[in-house]
Image: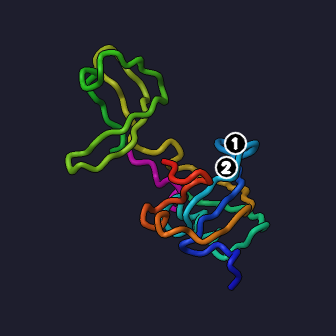
Amino acid sequence: MSNEQVTAGKAVGIHFTLKLCDGKVVDSSEGQDPMLYLHGQGNIVPGLEEQLDGKAIGDKINADVDPEQGYGIRKEAGMTEVPRTDFPDDVKFVKGMQFVFEGEGGEVAPGWVVDFTDETVMIDLNHPLAGEHLHFEVEICSVRDATQEELKHGHPHGAGGHEH
């Protein structure tokens, strides 16, 4: 197996465009440096990671990913109404604004503002792309062995070192 193939424990650089079924582009690395991720560590959606496994530098793929292997199925239980008093007084709410919430067990989860009134804020704990069928256009730009530090942290570090 070539050292340039995408396998677990490799830091992989990709250029990508993510579209929904209607063709709407929702994310892209166009005009930027390639996105770097650590293969096998869950840094990208499982359905895309699986389709990149074994590919090599220069390979281009079109990957269709169902919701179950993307950002999950939308769950109505993910919608929750929170008293506005639970937020700092100076917050200027905007639909789509993201917050990070801590659960009873200490786990953290992102949530997005769906609506708000003077008394409450409706938060959606589903990822904004939950329930969506995803279409990725990907080019493998780089593949290298991850460093021990990267493997320990579970993600790659940029050219300048540790980037979080």
Residue 27 placement, left or right of 92: right
Q: Residue at x 71, y 44 (%)?
A: 32
Name the residue tied to disc 1: 25
Residue range in magenta is: 67-76
Q: Is 73 within the magenta?
A: yes
Q: In which quadrant is the N terminus drawn?
A: bottom right
Q: Quadrant of residue 60?
A: bottom right
x%, y% of residue 14? Answer: 69, 58
Q: Residues within 10 Å of mark 2 (few under 14, many from 20)?
A: some
Q: Nearer the viewer, residue 112 or 144?
A: 144
Q: Is residue 147 above or below residue 71?
A: below
Q: Is residue 89 above or below residue 125?
A: above
Q: Position of residue 45 (x, y in %)?
A: 54, 59
Q: Which mark is residue 91?
A: none
Single out the residue that lies furthest toward the left. Answer: 104
Report x, y in % for residue 54.
66, 76
**Which residue is found at the position 28% from the left and 29% from the top?**
82
Residue 36, quarter of picture: bottom right
User: SS for tag 2?
Assistant: strand
Q: In percent of the image, x 29 and y 21: which residue is there?
A: 88
Residue 110 x %, y %: 39, 42
| Observer-nearest of 43 and 112 | 43
Residue situated furthest front in the rendering: 160
Give neighbour class at mark 1: few <14, some 14-19, many 20+ (Cα, 10 Å).
few
Residue 131 located within the stretch drawn in magenta: no
Q: Tag 1, which secondary structure?
A: strand
Give the numbered dot on residue 18. 2
Query: Could you tell me how many numbered marks the image carries?
Result: 2
- The amino acid type of the residue labelled 2 equals Leu
Q: Mark 1 near mark 2, Cβ–Cβ under 8 Å?
A: yes
Q: CA distance from mark 1 to mark 2?
A: 6 Å
User: Principal SS element in the magenta part?
Assistant: loop
